[in-house]
Amino acid sequence: MWQKDILVLPDDLIAFAWSAPMRDLAAKLELSDVGLKKLLTRCGVASPPQGYWNKIRAGKRVPALPKAPPRRPGEFGRASVDARFKKVLTIATPLASNGPFASALVPEDLDELDAQELKAIGKVSVPQTLDRPHKGLVQILKQELRRRDKNAGRQWTFDKPKFDNALGKRRLRILNALFLALSKRGHDGDAYEHDGEIHARAIIGDTPLGLDIQIVGSHRTVRHQGYLRPAPDLSTSTPLALQLDPSFDRKATISWQDDGDTKLESRIAEIAAAIIVAGEKKFRLGLREAEKRAERERIEKENRRQEQLAQLNQQRLQNLRTSGELLRQAEDIRSLVERVRSAIDDGSVAINAATLEAWHEWPLAEADRLDPVRSGQIMTHLHAPGNR
């Protein structure tokens, strides 16, 4: 976006989208009607059906104004739109960090949410192939296919497929099953490869969380391009662990791993439900952090304001002292002129009237120039800082 987005209530955005024909609404925002419709679609807001406004003008019955869907786990409960919408919509405040968070789809209690999601996900099977992958793995799989085709028939290459072995394929199958389970509940996930490692995340509503799937314990390694990598012939029975890294800082909060005969593949539903709960938990904690950050910024801003006021008040006091000094200088000059006049009048000084007249205009003009009231210098301290 070329401008910073703002957050608005979804119902307010829907009401705006259904308040007038698209062309009229777009003109208010300096957008094309096609551009506005695309933006609304990205926000999940449907436009009135074709012929809606003709029916309105004809006095016919039309569909009722739709309502925004209830907030899902991890969602902000707000729509992010172009800042130009400030012209027509009120900026929404975030949910309060102390809730309530409940909606038709999210219970207030996180344990209840876990039980709800586990039941809704149901039994999850892990396909033995990646013939029908989740869209979040398509990038890695295309990259693997490109490497495979490029290096077919070559005896040696530095750019081999990274996961074209039993354990690598198992890791991808586990992530694929997890992403598919999350998608059953309207959530998402994706992954990419970098330096031979899988970097994955789950996206719960509007909240991303890091995922890491690694080998547990000691295992054989080989050196590849200066890095120690797991040996490519490790079997699928090699223990794996899936870790949840909500803040992408390599600080896992939850971990699941193969345990004897219990494999990760048999725990996908449990893991998916826990990740959904973790997404909602991160969202709630994020509200608290945002409030703390806003309070810190408010305090810092107030401290800067007070420091600036102190500096301005110090300058105001100095300007006041300057006014007093300038006034004394002006009054001294005027007093001198009067003393000269008096001396001439009583004969103490022999200056003729023409000479006096030619002289006295100059010191009085200088006195007026110095006078803080006549020069306007007094305005530099007349008003308190902040009240100008």
Image (cartoon, rainbow, N blue to C red):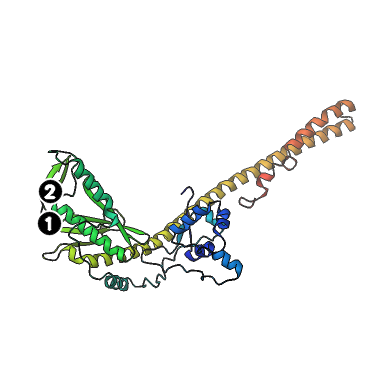
Residue 338, position as x, y percentages in the image: 83, 36
Judge whether residue 295 can be spotted in this image.
no
Q: Nearer the viewer, residue 269 or 150?
A: 150
Element under disc 1: loop
* 254 up-or-down from 158: above or below: below
Residue 272, position as x, y percentages in the image: 26, 65
Is 203 left, or right, of 342 in this rendering?
A: left
Q: Quadrant of residue 364?
A: top right
Q: Read off the residue under disc 1.
A: 236
Q: Nearer the viewer, residue 341 or 268?
A: 268
Q: Amino acid at mark 2?
A: Pro
Q: Nearer the viewer, residue 72 or 377?
A: 72
Q: Read off the residue under disc 2.
A: 232
Q: Amino acid at mark 1?
A: Thr
Q: CA distance from mark 1 to mark 2?
A: 11 Å
Q: Quadrant of residue 263?
A: bottom left
Q: Residues within 10 Å of mark 1 (few under 14, many from 20)?
A: some
Disc ID at residue 375 = none
